[in-house]
C-alpha cells in the first residue's frame, strides 16, 4: 500500500512539476515574442498580464512610458485603453442588471422622457450591442453636457431600423450613460468609480477629465504615471493625444494600468461584483441579427470561436489596449501599449502560448496614422 501511495504521489508531483515548467516556458516565450515585436515595430512601451481563474500567471512591463524622460513602464503606469473602456461600462451594466435596477428588455423611453416615435422599439440591449440605429453626434461644441447631446441626437433620424443590424457607434453608450445617471443620481464618472473600479481594486487609473477652455488650452486632471502615446511620422516619433469629450467617456477615454486591468479580470473570476454563472450568460451569448450570429454579445463584447475555442473581449485605440477572455480555459490575456499605430493582435498571439488548441497567429501589424 505504501508503495502504491508513493507511486501515485510521485506521478502527481511530476504532473504538477511539468505543468509549472510548461507555464514558465510559456512566460519566457511571451517575453521573447513581445521583445522581438517591440524592436521590429518600434513600439515604445507595453505591459502584459495573463490571468487564469483569478490568479496572476504573468504580469510584465516593457520599455518606456515616456520618451522625453525615458520613464520606464511599471505595473502602475496608466495607459489610454480607448474603446476597452466599453468593457468597464459593460461591467457596470451587468452589476446594475444583477442588482435588478435595470433590464436589457427595458425600453429607452422608460428612462428618457419625450423620446421620438422612431425610438419606440429601442431597448437597453440595443444600446449596449450597437443595434439601436441611433446616429452619432457631430458638433463643433464637443463639450456640451450629456443631457444636451441626448436632446440633439433625439432630433436625428435613425441610420437603420432598430435591431436590423449592428453598427459600431458612440451615441449608444452615451445614451446608456445618461440612463445610468438617472438610475444612480450622479455623474457617470462617479458611478463607474463607486460601482466598478473601486470594488475591483482598480486604484491607478481614471479619466483625465480633459476640457478645452476658451478654445485656447486644455485642462486635465492629474493621473500619476500616465503614459504618452506615440506614432511614427516619416521615421520620427511624434507624441499625440486623442481628444475625448466627456460625453464619450462610457465608450472610451479611460486610463488604466496593467495592475488595474489584472485586478478587473481577477474580480470577474472571483465573483466580486456578480457571479460568473450570471454574467457568462450575457458576455458570451449573442442574438441573431438578420439570421446571423451578432458580432457583439448581449452586453457589447466582441465574441468569436477559433479552433473550437470560445472567447470574448474588446480592443481600443485600435491596439492601445487588447483584452480577451477564454471562459472554458479560464484565461484572460491583457496587453496595453502606447503605440498609436498598433493594430489588435497581441492578445490573440499570446493566447496561443498558453492554449495549445489555438493555432498560432503571431503576425503583429501596424497602420499608418496621419
Image: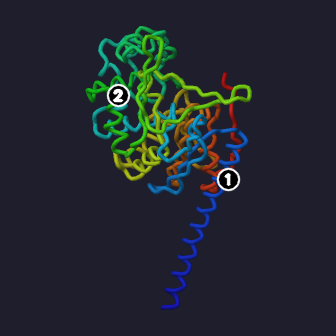
Residue 108 visible in the displayed image: yes
Q: To which quarter of the image does residue 178 belong? A: top left
| Residue furthest left in the image | 185
Q: Is residue 44 left or right of residue 155?
A: right
Q: Nearer the viewer, residue 364 or 212?
A: 212
Q: To which quarter of the image does residue 106 belong? A: top left
Q: How many marks?
A: 2
Q: Is residue 97 left or right of residue 338?
A: left
Q: Position of residue 209 (x, y in %)?
A: 41, 26
**Disc 2 to disc 1, how far (Cα)?**
40 Å
| Residue furthest front in the image | 69
What residue do we see at 52% from left, 40% from top?
313
Q: Position of residue 23 (x, y in %)?
A: 59, 62
Figure check: 55 above or below 119: below
- Near mark 2 (Cα within 10 A), the count class, few <14, some 14-19 or many ≥20, is many
Q: Tell me the SS state at disc 1.
A: helix
Q: Position of residue 191 (x, y in %)?
A: 32, 32
Quarter holding the C terminus is top right
The residue singled out by tag 1 in the image is 32
Q: Earlier in the sequence, mark 2 or mark 1?
A: 1
Q: Do tag 2 and tag 1 residues touch (Cβ < 8 Å)?
A: no
- Near mark 1 (Cα within 10 A), the count class, few <14, some 14-19 or many ≥20, is few
Figure check: 95 above or below 124: below
Q: Is residue 215 left or right of residue 36?
A: left
What residue do we see at 31% from left, 18% from top?
112
Q: Position of residue 322 (x, y in %)?
A: 56, 40
The residue singled out by tag 2 in the image is 188
Q: Nearer the viewer, residue 319 or 1?
A: 319
Nearest-to-viewer mark from 2 and 1: 1
Q: Is residue 301 left or right of residue 200?
A: right
Amino acid at each position: 500500500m505504501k508503495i502504491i501511495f508513493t507511486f501515485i504521489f510521485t506521478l502527481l508531483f511530476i504532473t504538477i512539476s511539468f505543468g509549472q515548467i510548461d507555464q514558465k516556458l510559456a512566460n519566457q516565450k511571451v517575453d521573447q515574442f513581445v521583445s522581438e515585436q517591440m524592436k521590429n515595430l518600434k513600439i515604445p512601451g507595453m505591459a502584459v498580464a495573463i490571468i487564469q481563474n483569478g490568479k496572476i500567471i504573468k504580469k510584465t512591463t516593457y520599455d518606456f512610458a515616456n520618451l522625453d524622460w525615458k520613464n520606464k513602464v511599471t505595473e502602475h503606469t496608466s495607459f489610454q485603453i480607448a474603446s476597452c473602456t466599453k468593457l468597464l461600462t459593460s461591467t457596470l451594466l451587468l452589476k446594475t442588471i444583477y442588482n435588478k435596477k435595470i433590464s436589457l428588455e427595458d425600453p429607452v423611453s422608460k428612462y428618457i422622457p419625450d423620446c421620438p416615435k422612431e425610438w419606440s422599439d429601442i431597448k437597453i440591449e440595443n444600446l449596449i450591442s450597437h443595434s439601436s440605429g441611433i446616429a452619432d453626434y457631430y458638433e463643433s461644441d464637443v463639450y456640451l453636457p450629456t443631457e444636451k447631446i441626448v436632446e440633439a441626437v433625439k432630433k436625428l433620424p435613425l441610420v437603420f431600423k432598430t435591431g436590423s443590424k449592428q453598427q459600431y457607434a458612440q451615441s449608444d453608450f452615451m445614451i446608456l450613460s445618461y440612463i445610468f445617471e438617472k438610475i444612480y443620481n450622479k455623474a457617470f464618472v462617479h458611478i463607474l468609480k463607486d460601482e466598478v473600479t473601486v470594488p475591483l481594486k482598480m486604484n491607478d487609473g481614471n479619466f483625465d477629465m480633459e476640457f478645452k477652455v476658451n478654445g485656447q488650452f486644455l485642462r486635465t486632471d492629474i493621473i500619476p504615471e500616465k503614459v504618452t502615446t506615440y506614432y511614427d511620422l516619416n521615421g520620427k516619433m511624434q507624441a499625440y493625444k486623442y481628444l475625448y469629450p466627456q460625453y464619450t467617456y462610457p465608450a472610451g477615454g479611460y486610463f488604466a494600468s496593467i495592475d488595474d486591468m489584472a485586478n478587473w479580470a481577477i474580480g470577474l473570476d472571483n465573483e466580486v461584483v456578480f457571479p460568473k454563472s450570471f454574467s457568462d450568460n450575457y458576455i458570451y451569448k449573442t442574438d441573431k441579427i438578420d439570421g446571423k450570429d451578432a458580432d457583439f454579445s448581449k452586453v457589447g463584447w466582441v465574441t468569436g470561436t477559433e479552433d473550437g475555442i470560445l472567447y470574448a473581449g474588446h480592443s481600443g485605440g485600435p491596439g492601445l489596449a487588447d483584452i480577451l477572455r477564454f471562459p472554458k480555459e479560464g484565461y484572460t490575456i491583457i496587453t496595453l501599449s502606447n503605440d498609436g499605430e498598433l493594430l489588435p493582435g497581441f492578445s490573440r498571439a499570446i493566447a496561443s502560448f498558453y492554449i495549445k488548441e489555438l493555432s498560432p497567429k503571431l503576425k503583429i501589424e501596424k497602420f499608418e496614422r496621419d
